[in-house]
């Protein structure tokens, strides 16, 4: 494993981690080994970006943490609670402590922003109260406060299906926060967003984790965003951790360990400059090559 020099002391073997996976392994029924003895410790307040090529096991790791996917072996600890040892009913209670934020937002389209955000409290209010969507005044006050914090207070009565991608993701974040979680599991939060909105969403997530002391594990395929916003980057390849360090240590050797051989030193602008300009007349032989003949 390639590990860069830690910025603020060692990131491994912390005294009091918020999340700990121990030798977490997942083999699907198809025989695919998606996670191979993954051991990770994430302290309170840390934003960890999980990167790696498609099929590396990022989504499986996130889903094994809250047991949406059942691990084959290994353990997951949330604070002192061993999530892997819980019954279904106990797990439902423990999941309140974990906020999930998805790529596709998972909003209820015909409900308003406020109703979607309050659905984050459904695990807490009783069945009949939630059936009539009667929430305690304290929940309503907190929902307003949270919507204000994520910049959506003027949209409370708007239906979810009338929002932009960035606004929808903010609703997803507010809903997760209303659960009062200790840990955020975030699956490709920016995959459907433009670059500017992606940065705004990442910035918001990082600020919120800092303000509330939340740990976050963010599955993200955009390495530049991961480097810019996360405090720690973990690279997965073939279900194993092949990099674990601060963003500054994510050099060409680390990127090769995670994604395989490539000339990582060339920027997009350099790549473009190296290509012949559009409409350029190629020598005959090259033109034939370019046409695949
Ligand atoms: P990533 O999120 O990094 O793209 P995944 O966790 O989705 O990776 O997948 C890891 C591996 O597990 C891949 O080989 C994938 O084909 C396999 N896999 C994922 N989900 C399933 C499933 N439900 N059934 C069988 N194999 C799966």
Image (cartoon, helix red, strand yellow):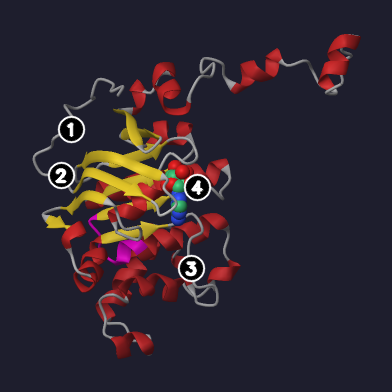
Q: Secondary structure at mark 2?
A: loop
Q: Which residues are magenta?
A: 176-182
Residue 182 lies, in percent from the top left, at 22, 56
Mark 1 Cα-neighbour bin, 10 Å: few <14, some 14–19, many ≥20? some
Q: Is residue 184 magenta?
A: no
Q: Is mark 4 within 8 Å of ligand 1?
A: no
Residue in front for this viewpoint, 116 or 140: 116
Residue under the image location 58 percent in, 69 percent down: 161
Left or right: 197 in relation to 140: right
* Mark identifier at residue 17: 2
**Sequence-first tag of 2 and 1:** 1
Residue in front for this viewpoint, 214 or 245: 245
Q: Secondary structure at mark 4?
A: loop
Mark 2 Cα-neighbour bin, 10 Å: few <14, some 14–19, many ≥20? many
Left or right: 197 in relation to 132: right
Name the residue that disc number 3 marks.
Answer: 107
Q: Is mark 2 within 8 Å of ligand 1?
A: no
Marks 2/1: CA distance? Answer: 9 Å
Residue 105 visible to the viewer = yes
Mark 4 Cα-neighbour bin, 10 Å: few <14, some 14–19, many ≥20? many
Badges 2 and 1: C-beta atoms under 8 Å apart? Answer: no
Name above or below for residue 96 compared with residue 233: below
Name the residue that disc number 4 marks.
Answer: 190
Q: Secondary structure at mark 1?
A: loop
């Amino acid at each position: 494993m390639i590990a860069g020099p830690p910025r603020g002391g060692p990131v491994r073997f912390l005294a009091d981690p918020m999340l700990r996976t121990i030798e977490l392994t997942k083999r699907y029924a198809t025989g695919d080994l998606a996670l191979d003895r993954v051991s990770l410790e994430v302290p309170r307040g840390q934003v960890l970006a999980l990167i790696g090529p498609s099929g590396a096991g990022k989504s499986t790791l996130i889903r094994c943490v809250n047991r949406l996917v059942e691990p084959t072996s290994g353990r997951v600890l949330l604070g002192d609670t061993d999530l892997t040892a819980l019954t279904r009913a106990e797990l439902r209670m423990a999941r309140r402590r974990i906020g999930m934020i998805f790529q596709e937002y998972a909003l209820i389209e015909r409900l308003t922003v406020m109703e979607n955000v309050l659905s984050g409290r459904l695990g807490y209010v009783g069945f009949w109260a939630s059936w009539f969507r009667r929430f305690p005044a304290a929940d309503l006050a907190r929902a307003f406060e949270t919507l204000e914090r994520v910049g959506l207070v003027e949209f409370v009565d708007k239906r979810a299906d009338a929002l932009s991608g960035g606004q929808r993701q903010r609703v997803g974040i507010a809903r997760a926060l209303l659960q009062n979680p200790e840990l955020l599991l975030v699956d490709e939060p920016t995959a459907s967003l433009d670059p500017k909105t992606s940065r705004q969403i990442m910035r918001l997530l990082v600020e919120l984790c800092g303000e509330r002391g939340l740990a976050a594990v963010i599955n993200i395929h955009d390495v530049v965003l991961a480097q810019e916003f996360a405090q720690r980057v973990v690279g997965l390849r073939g279900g194993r951790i092949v990099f674990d360090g601060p963003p500054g240590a994510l050099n060409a050797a680390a990127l090769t360990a995670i994604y395989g051989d490539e000339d990582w030193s060339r920027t997009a602008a350099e790549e473009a400059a190296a290509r012949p300009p559009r409409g350029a007349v190629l020598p005959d032989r090259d033109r034939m090559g370019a046409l695949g003949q």
